[in-house]
Image (spheres, helix red, strand yellow):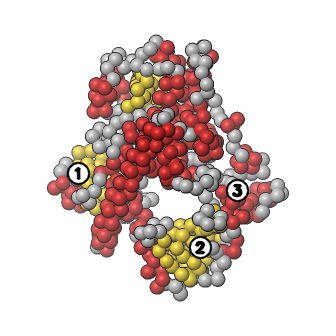
Amino acid sequence: MSREIIEKTVDGSVVADLVATGLEPLQARLLALRGVTAATLDGYLRPSLDSLASPSDLPGVQAAADAILAAVRAGRPVVVFGDYDCDGVCATAIMVSALGALGADVRPFVPDRLSEGYGMNDASVDRMLAENPGVGLVITVDNGINSVEQVARLKAGGVEVVVTDHHLPGETLPDCIVVNPKVSAPPELDGLCGAGVAFLLSNAVVTSAVDCGFYTGPKVGGPLMVLAGLATVTDIMPLTGQNRILVTEALRRFRTLAPVGLRELFDRASRSAAPLTSRDFGFLIGPRINAAGRIAKGTDALDLVLATDREKARELAMKVDHHNLERKSIEQRMSDAAFAQADEQIGSGAPALVIVVPDGHQGVSGIVASRVLERLSSKGRAVPVCVVVGCHGSARAPEGYNVRDAFAGCAEVLTSFGGHAAAGGFSVVNEGEIGRFRELFCAACAMQASAAGPVAAKGVAVDAVIDGREVTLSLAEWIRGLEPFGEGNPAPLFAMKSVCVADARPLGQDGRHLQLSFRGAGMPRAVWWNRGDLVEEMRLASGVPFDVTFTVEVSNYGEPHAEAWLSSVDPA
């Protein structure tokens, strides 16, 4: 499906002011599109910890810090009730490390993904109480805002609770101290992740302990800041304002301040000596932390982050990295099976896909659903995708659909479901009802598509249409200076129009990726990640003009050079 290339509009006066500071016109345009002006240029290019908000700016922090410090001083056992994803693991490690430095009797708790599910529910609370008799205070991190009944149960049993979270609250808040930017916060703190909230609270607790003379030890904030920055990227929080400061400093100081376990894990994932970027957090470290919670135990990743002995950290890094290798193997096997079913179902005109992978892993089903949706989207045929393992499934959907509402239309064959518009999870009554679920889900998605009306081919909005000869190492290095990239601060997206493929070849040991060059375009090597399946198709289309979109990267394979990373290749 051909999509129009649309160059984003920009305020010419802002560009002119930026050019007046000595920037090139293209540089000024890219900055203006990110909301940067001549007045804010220095703060954007050089974010500083000096501009970080005070913990007390987040409502509830001081009350929570007072309650936590009182429990620590009284010697009451404290449980930090976390989560098994990277944000939850980092948030748990932040709070445990800070309270441990104060000499607290502090114990981490992470639910089991498969047997207990997410957050504070009856099953996880039962185990937490059984494993921690006499607990006096429970601090939730990255969860708890919707656990109203569980908080009431703990309080009735004499356990004090402090809830820290960043997820949207329900109609009723837990009856305890709550620290959650989605409940109340100034705009600059609204985008904090769970670990970001834990970082501000832990700083407030330590500061209060210092002020009253209870703590006289060394500063503890550096490693905790790195954890907060890592989690901000992996939880796809907006990389603007306070988050941009946290992530920038975390990347800058990772090699010196990160917990030894994270440094060991990164050394296993990358041998590059180049400065870290948000991609290292999002694609190297984060997936490895998440893999432990997906196919093993989140406590494996937590033990790694909390490790202080280098030899022990090295052993744990090997273990967590092995979990990731296992996850990748499972994901590849499941994806191959899912792609085959997807082609068959989409070929029959199905309004949604329900793919069953009998020998798959429940913890990887969401990733596989995303892979299938990405593959369909690249061909202009995107519809909601469910991947089912046993009685449990995960769904992903393109813009214009709401899988949570579609699940509601399938309630007669589901024991549970949840999520939001773009993603969700569900459990069917038994495997014999999957066929009925497919009928109901497809019908619900067809109704959503019908209500929305025909969907026109969308244009691709880019920062600038450029000539391939402009893709230079100098440009790539300047763009790297705009890091960290991610949600709210995307890497610049460029386009070239009407170019023909000169050569296409598989890339990587398994040929999973695709390398392209273009006739007379003047652009260096272009790489299209995870699209090695298109190599023959692109070779056969060598005479067809394409519009291509791409980001510009610095490659350190061999001598440093510029490289184009393709986002889309559409017939011109």
| SS category of the residue bearing label 3 | helix
Q: Amino acid at mark 1?
A: Cys
Q: Residue at x 66, y 57 (%)?
A: 480
Q: Amino acid at mark 2?
A: Arg
Residue in front for this viewpoint, 305 or 242: 305
Question: Would you say 23 lies left or right of 93 here?
Answer: right
Q: Residues within 10 Å of mark 2 (few under 14, many from 20)?
A: some
Residue indicated by mark 2:
525
Residue 294 is marked as none
Q: Residue at x 59, y 43 (%)?
A: 254
User: Could you tell me if the residues under marks 2 and 3 are in contact, i.e. CB atoms within 8 Å?
Assistant: no
Q: Amino acid at mark 3?
A: Leu
Give me the C-alpha separation between circle 1 and circle 2.
Answer: 45 Å
Q: Quick one: which residue is furthest to the bottom in this view? A: 543
Residue indicated by mark 3:
31
Residue in front for this viewpoint, 38 or 269: 269
Q: Is residue 390 visible?
A: yes
| Vertical side of 75 occupied by 343: above or below | below
